Amino acid sequence: MRPCLVSVPILVAATLLAACQPTRASPPRRAYHCADGRVVQAGYEGTDRAVLAVDGATHRLTIALSASGARYVGDGWQWWTKGMHDAWLAPLQPGENIASAPGVACQAQGGP
């Protein structure tokens, strides 16, 4: 039986290509201090996704229609930002796309 010499270069090439693939890094996060004492870490993946760290859990939200500011919904939360410093966090009830709860005001700390 003849040894297969092609498999080793292919294996090496595949390994090198896999090592060169970009990894999905977490977006930079900004701390928001909320009126209820909670701290929300918010990061943004492009213009259509927000990643929130709330109460020790990470939540991925997607952009939603809003008349003003940027509103994100998903995973039981609504995150509505206005400018770079003001935001509101509200829980979403099952089946809601717009929070019926008033939520809590949050203010970004530091940064631009």
Image (cartoon, rainbow, N blue to C red):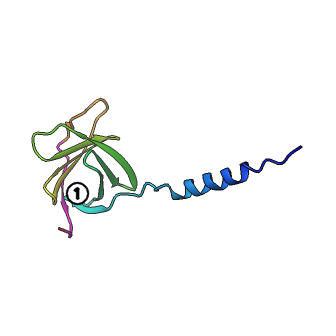
Q: Position of residue 34 (x, y in %)?
A: 22, 58
The N terminus sits in image quarter:
top right
Instruction: From the viewer's perspective, tell me whether residue 98 is left or right of residue 13.
Output: left
Using the rendered view, name the quadrant where residue 9 is placed.
Answer: bottom right
Q: Is residue 81 magenta?
A: no
The answer to which of 56 and 45 lies nearer the viewer is: 45
Q: Would residue 7 appear left or right of 30 to someone viewing this image?
A: right
Q: Position of residue 83 (x, y in %)?
A: 13, 55
Q: Residue at x 24, y 61 (%)?
A: 32
Mark 1 crowd level (few <14, some 14–19, many ≥20, 10 Å Cα): few
Q: Is residue 94 above or below residue 109?
A: above
The magenta span reads 102-111
Q: Residue at x 10, y 44 (%)?
A: 68
| Among the 4 quarters of the image, the one containing residue 63 | top left
In the displayed structure, 23 sits above or below 48; it is below
Closer to us: 79 or 9: 9
Assign a secondary structure to mark 1.
loop
Q: Position of residue 6 (x, y in %)?
A: 72, 49
Q: Three-letter amino acid code at disc 1?
A: Asp
Q: Position of residue 12 (x, y in %)?
A: 66, 56
Please give the name of the residue rendered at 62% of the width and 54% of the height, measured from the top-left corner. 13
Is 59 left, or right, of 111 in this rendering?
right
Q: Which residue reaches farthest right? A: 1
Q: As rendered, which of 23 and 3 lies closer to the eye?
A: 3
How many numbered dots are placed on residues in this image?
1
Residue at (27, 38) in percent of width and height: 92
Say above or below: 60 vs 23: above
Quadrant in which the C terminus is drawn: bottom left
Q: Which residue, as the protein is rendered here, is positioned at the far top?
A: 95
The residue wearing badge 1 is 36
Q: Residue furthest left?
A: 67
Would residue 106 be counted in the magenta stretch? yes
